[in-house]
């Protein structure tokens, strides 16, 4: 297939008018398939990759159900998210093991055309601070446990890509050193100070879970984990651009601190994404949803009700983040963070043809392409 007349997001993270060739499932320099897809009036971007979301359309990753993952993957794909790395919650070990095993079974059985590709999953807890638990269930918070983590990694069969940890918890630094080479360790749901965060990054942590949220703020006398992450250039930072979690000026400040190569947009969506207002659950806790706002009974923000494509549009349309920057934060940046960039995340010969055509004037989706096949 040939995609013609589109403005293509290049490896240099800019847009260029050019033809794109697809041979089979991959991007190519030429093709034996003469069919043409007209991209007139559109941007052609890589498929989005959400490396931190919990659920959507009434389903949750923690359901530990094949059906739930199927429904989630189909919704995400329709919204231009072609790769998903859903997140668990702070739960007991046996439940987390079931979640890991279900993800492995799904990955073994799923067809690439059924929905967004499951590229891994994200363990958000249970090794977090009870003081910054956010919407996590305090009943299951525990100190970092190397034995438990080995069990989770064994059950995940390589699919576990990230884990959130509070570095001030007892045993955190030995834990980070033990696992830094096998999973990307993220600092989050933490009350740690600057020195503790700096030590965690030096020990091998390389990521920050939903920057600003569930962590101490940047303060001029107590700079905290945000300053420590900013100073370590190997650290990437997630941020939720749903218009609820972080104010536009703070989003722009994050880019000034970390730079556009290290920022990653996530949705942190829960099962209410794609659903009407009402009551839902997250990690066993009741959540009230009105519009984009999802809260626990006590008013704590509980994830988002917005998918990643809508977060990207919000960043562009209301937060003054340039289109080119927003696209990279949803594609190549997350792909690099979880080691998926060799075959995904950019429009480059040899990579899988996971692509989205967006109308230039509205950023509405015209077509989604998964592994070379036009899905919608």
Image (cartoon, rainbow, N blue to C red):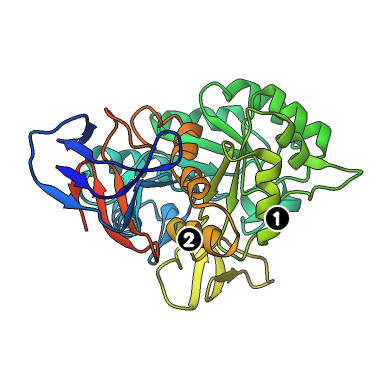
Give neighbour class at mark 1: few <14, some 14-19, many 20+ (Cα, 10 Å): few
Specify whether 177 is left or right of 215. left
Image position of 88 with respect to 340: above or below? below
> What x and y, as percent, mark residue 293?
57, 71
Whether residue 206 is visible to the viewer of this picture, yes or no, is yes
Q: Which residue is mark 2?
A: 313
Dividing the picture into quadrants, the one containing residue 41 is bottom left
Question: Which residue is found at the position 52% from the left and 46% from the top?
Answer: 325
Is residue 283 among the parts visible in the rendering? no
Percent position of residue 141, x then y? 65, 47
The disc, 2 or 1, on the residue closer to the chain's N-terminal end is 1
Compared with 40, 205 (above or below) is above
Residue 201 coordinates in the image, percent (x, y): 69, 28
Q: Nearer the viewer, residue 92 or 253?
A: 253
Q: Is residue 87 left or right of residue 138?
A: left
Q: Which residue lies at the image location 81% right of the left edge and 41% below the top edge?
A: 224
Q: Circle 1 sits in a helix, a strand or a loop, which is it?
A: helix
Q: Which residue is mark 1?
A: 250
Would you say the residues marked 2 and 1 are in contact, meaning their CB atoms lie under 8 Å apart? no
């Amino acid at each position: 297939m040939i995609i013609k007349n589109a403005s293509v997001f290049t490896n240099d993270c800019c847009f260029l008018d050019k033809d794109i060739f697809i041979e089979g499932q991959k991007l190519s320099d030429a093709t034996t398939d003469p069919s043409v897809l007209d991209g007139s009036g559109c941007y052609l971007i890589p498929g989005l990759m959400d490396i931190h979301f919990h659920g959507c359309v009434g389903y949750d990753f923690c359901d530990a159900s094949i059906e739930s993952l199927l429904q989630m993957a189909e919704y995400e794909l329709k919204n231009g998210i072609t790769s998903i790395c859903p997140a668990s919650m702070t739960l007991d070990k046996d439940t987390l093991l079931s979640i890991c095993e279900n993800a492995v079974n799904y990955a073994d059985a799923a067809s690439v055309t059924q929905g967004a590709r499951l590229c891994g999953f994200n363990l958000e807890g249970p090794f977090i601070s009870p003081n910054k638990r956010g919407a996590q269930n305090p009943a299951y918070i525990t100190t970092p446990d190397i034995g438990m983590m080995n069990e989770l990694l064994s059950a995940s069969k390589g699919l576990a890509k990230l884990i959130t940890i509070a570095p001030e918890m007892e045993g955190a630094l030995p834990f980070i050193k033990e696992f830094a080479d096998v999973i990307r360790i993220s600092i989050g749901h933490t009350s740690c100070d600057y020195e503790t965060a700096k030590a965690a990054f030096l020990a091998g942590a390389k990521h920050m879970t939903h920057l600003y949220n569930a962590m101490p703020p940047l303060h001029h006398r107590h700079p905290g984990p945000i300053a420590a992450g900013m100073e370590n250039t190997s650290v990437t930072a997630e941020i939720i651009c749903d218009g609820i979690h972080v104010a536009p000026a703070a989003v722009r400040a994050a880019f000034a601190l970390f730079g556009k190569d290290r920022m990653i947009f996530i949705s942190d969506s829960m099962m209410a994404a794609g659903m009407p207002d009402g009551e839902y659950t997250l990690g066993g806790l009741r959540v009230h949803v009105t519009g984009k706002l999802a809260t626990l009974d006590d008013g704590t923000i509980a994830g988002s009700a917005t998918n990643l494509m809508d977060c990207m549009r919000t960043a562009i349309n209301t937060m003054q983040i340039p289109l080119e920057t927003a696209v990279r934060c949803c594609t190549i940046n997350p792909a690099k963070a979880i080691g998926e960039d060799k075959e995904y995340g950019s429009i480059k010969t040899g990579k899988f043809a996971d692509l989205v055509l967006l109308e230039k004037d509205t950023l509405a989706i015209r077509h989604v392409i998964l592994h070379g096949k036009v899905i919608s």
